[in-house]
Amino acid sequence: MFRRLLTLDQAKKLIDDLGLVALGSEEVSLREAHGRILAEDIVSSLDIPPFDRSTVDGYAVKAEDTYGAEENAPVYLKLAGAVNVGEPPTVGISRGETAEIVTGAQIPYGADSVVMIEDTEQKNNIITILNAVAKNENIMRRGTDIEKGETMLLKGQKVGSREMGVIAATGRAKVRVFLIPSVAVLSTGNEVTEPGRDLPPGRIYDINAYSLMGAVFESGGKPIHMGIAPDEEAQLRETLEKALSLADVVVTSAGVSVGPKDMLPQTIDALGKPGLLFSGIAVKPGKPTTMAIAGRKPVFSLPGHPASALLMFHLIAKPVIQKVAGRDSTEINTVRAFAGKRMFSAKGRRTFVMVNIDRDRRDRLVAEPVETGASGAITTLAKADGYLEIPENLQFIDENDEVLVTLLSSPE
């Protein structure tokens, strides 16, 4: 294995050339749409607001009837009736008349503005106007928020609380969203034990499955925990075949290096055509990363080291899961910072350095490498906010160089 390492760009191009697309869509109730990805543009079928409405409590008037009104020279108008919110007006306004109105109520026929109640006085059926208003003052005109036929939200947008409100404003109770891809997550190795069980001598708890399942959630997928497969070819193949039957994408960790028990590349190559896409990328960490296509389903086999597995998931697997989920696969969260110290690259390989972000005395964002001594150290997962990239042709990044840090999770 790894006789011919692809560059990261070559590996990504192979994936892009597959032409993977979103799985499909379904119609869900608006109550269930939060967090989903729109599979259609949302176009308003009506004007919003659907009628001219008052923005204040007061009196609907013809603006010209109030011209010149002030406290020392008020205007007197006859009260013609009242307009309640949620009801169509039953009164119209003629010259010299007014109608009582509340916030949100429909403007009655003949009126073109509203005088705020604090600028009026009432005695019997006579309303004293103490302040003049201009035409359209204190009125929201029909369609001034959203016009009928206007595109309000775009296909591919994530539905959050604001988007739900916008959709509800059109009166829609259902919306079409992309299907959520199911992603089978499998750990391999005789040394791995499921959390919650006693830890036998010489074993470690399964870290990767849980960090990768969290990453699947963050990418827009639904993880399926397949447990731990031992380093035995028949059982490994059986578990992988089950994973492929249950999920749209499969992600495994460990078993992709060059040891005698590392049999994943040849096993996934035999699962279905076209088989192995690549096995080995010229990066550090993460060189053993492998990918195959089995029956049109992507299978990613990541390194066993927890930090390496999570990094390669973000670089290789996450964009694919986002794409089949209907999300923008180019959307990444980055911040600019300054290097806290000199960081070296691995000769001939694109190098990724896990870093945490802090502010220095000058209030600058500073990227400090997470000192672990090994790509598998657990502290890397706990301390790292993201990673920075050192190109193949660069020996090092110097202290105080400006760097671009890709965040491992979205900022709150």
Image: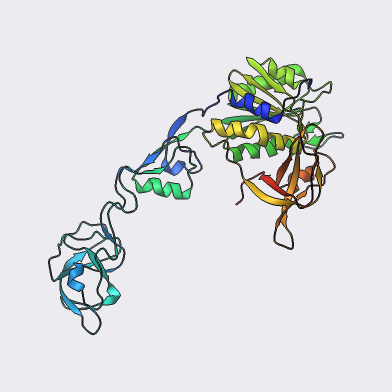
Name the quadrant containing residue 131: bottom left
Task: Depth check: give the residue in front, 400 or 1.
Answer: 400
The residue shown at (59%, 17%) is 295
- Residue 395 visible in the snapshot: yes
Task: Depth check: give the residue in front, 121 or 276.
Answer: 276
Location of the N terminus by quadrant is top right
Residue at the extreme bottom of the image, as rendered: 72
- 286 sits left or right of 26 in the view: right
Task: Depth check: give the residue in front, 335 or 143.
Answer: 335
Name the quadrant containing residue 60: bottom left
* Up/down of 278 relative to 105, above or below: above
- Residue 99 visible in the snapshot: no
* Up/down of 351 relative to 81, above or below: above
Residue at the extreme front of the image, as rendered: 393
The residue shown at (40%, 48%) is 166
- Tag count: 0
- The image position of residue 250, as x and y in percent, is 64, 27
- The image position of residue 222, as x and y in percent, is 58, 34
Name the quadrant containing residue 268: top right
- 63 sits left or right of 354 in the view: left
* Up/down of 388 relative to 187, above or below: below
The residue shown at (59%, 38%) is 219
